[in-house]
Amino acid sequence: MSVRTVVTLALTALFLENFVFTRFLGVRAVIDASRSLRLVFMNGVVMIVLVGAAAPLVRLLDEYLLMPRGLEYLRLLVSVGVLMILSMGGEELMRRRLPGFYDALHAAQPMVMTNTAILGAVLLANQENLSAPQAALFGIFGALGFLLAALLFIGVRERIDMADCPGSFRGFPIALITLGLLSMAFMGFTGLRLW
Amino acid sequence: MSLSGLLIAALLLCGMAGVLAALALLSGRDEQASARAETLAEALPGLDCTRCGHAGCLAYAMAVAEGRAETDRCQPGGEQSRLELEHRLGRYEVEPEKYVAFVRCAGGLAAPQRYAYDGPAACAAAAILPGGGPMECRVGCLGLGSCARSCPVGAIDMVDGVARVNRDKCNGCMRCISVCPRHIIEAVPRSAAARPACAASWMATPCDFGCDLCGKCVTECRAGAISIKDGAVTVDDARCTGCGRCADVCERGVFQRLRNR
């Protein structure tokens, strides 16, 4: 895998096809997690590990088990299953071997399980016709993109909380509007042609 | 679609279901502890401040439920949280006293201001300005309502520029206490009958609604429950009969009756 491919993958996943801003995946998770910096990082770390492991696995399963036998219709189910097994298995493993990590990351688990960006990352990495290591990189950079989006958003949100916002917009509505404005800024990256 | 394809699909799905079921079985045995942790977590403030050394309130409750942690680790919750935890663990016979928030200021809009404030509507933002904010009084309610916004049950209203706690709604989570930059919100026992609504000591307030230490409440209290300590009026709840005389005689209306007899 050349450096060029890695950079291309990184730019694509981080900016060009940022899950949150251009695909609108994981919006709820971003809004939920932006309550605190800790939550954002917890979510980000869990997502990087989970997607980094699941994306190549699903890619391999797809390539060697599903595609040759015409079982593409199982792709979604298999992705969900692999994610479930990995997250539950990882949690169990952490609980037994790394209780410190478990305590720190356990609270993020419900938020991670309902994070559409994770399933989205796995499915998208599969669609792009990448090799397994490339799929892993795409997933990890995608998760980093999610982290970037959440970090950008938490900064803006701090200002919104202080601002004198009209009553009808306060809270969730203004959060969605802000996210929309941020995503418009990200639309500017579509001018980059890399693929 | 061939038969073997169907067979493989079925096997694949059954295999995944099997692995998931095994994992669920493996982790299922601490269901009881986590159910107990949830009831224990209700005794904690829910701030997830991590000062106890755990990842959050639920993680701490889990540790307590599994016997990995003491009950006195919660700093924001303090003594009340410890008692609540002990009670929920079944170690105490008596139900602990419930606390509610009380704002020690009655000034608000009528209190003298040094300058007009036109910044973000957040108390923390106003309090860092020169002179500790636009108010002349250093311990007066800034009236920007940060506590009201932090309240999860909507128990705090801003009335005439000062925060007022609705005691029927307050659930004693004490979030407002950590939010207030002036530290004038106090946890008082639900059974307390009266409190002076002024946080100033030694008459350190230019406000017409602040305590000027006239001492009338001290002499008029028949139970001898009121005294002046460190330049501030204090009420001894153990002696207080809740007659409400202090509130009647206070000329500045500082004393507030918290419950009727």
Image (cartoon, rainbow, N blue to C red):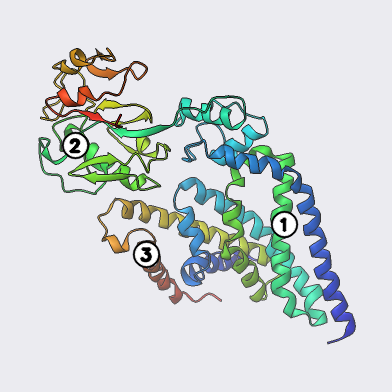
The chain ID associated with circle 2 is B
Amino acid at circle 3: Pro
The chain ID associated with circle 1 is A
Q: Which residue is mark 2?
A: B133
Contact between labelled residues 3 and 2, with CB atoms less than 8 Å apart: no
Left or right: residue A152 compared with residue A25: left
Mark 3 falls on what kind of element? helix
Residue A86's disc is 1
Relative to residue A67, is residue B76 depicted above or below? above
Question: What separation in Å lies between label 1 and label 3 (alpha carbons)?
Answer: 34 Å
Relative to residue B200, is residue A31 depicted above or below? below
Question: What separation in Å lies between label 2 and label 3 (alpha carbons)?
Answer: 31 Å
**Residue found at the far bottom of this picture:** B1
Mark 3 nearby-residue class (10 Å; few <14, some 14–19, many ≥20): few
What's the residue at 20%, 48% (across, down)?
A: B119
Percent position (x, y) of residue A67? 78, 79
Q: Which residue is mark 3?
A: A173
Question: What separation in Å lies between label 2 and label 1 (alpha carbons)?
Answer: 53 Å
Left or right: residue B64 compared with residue A22: right
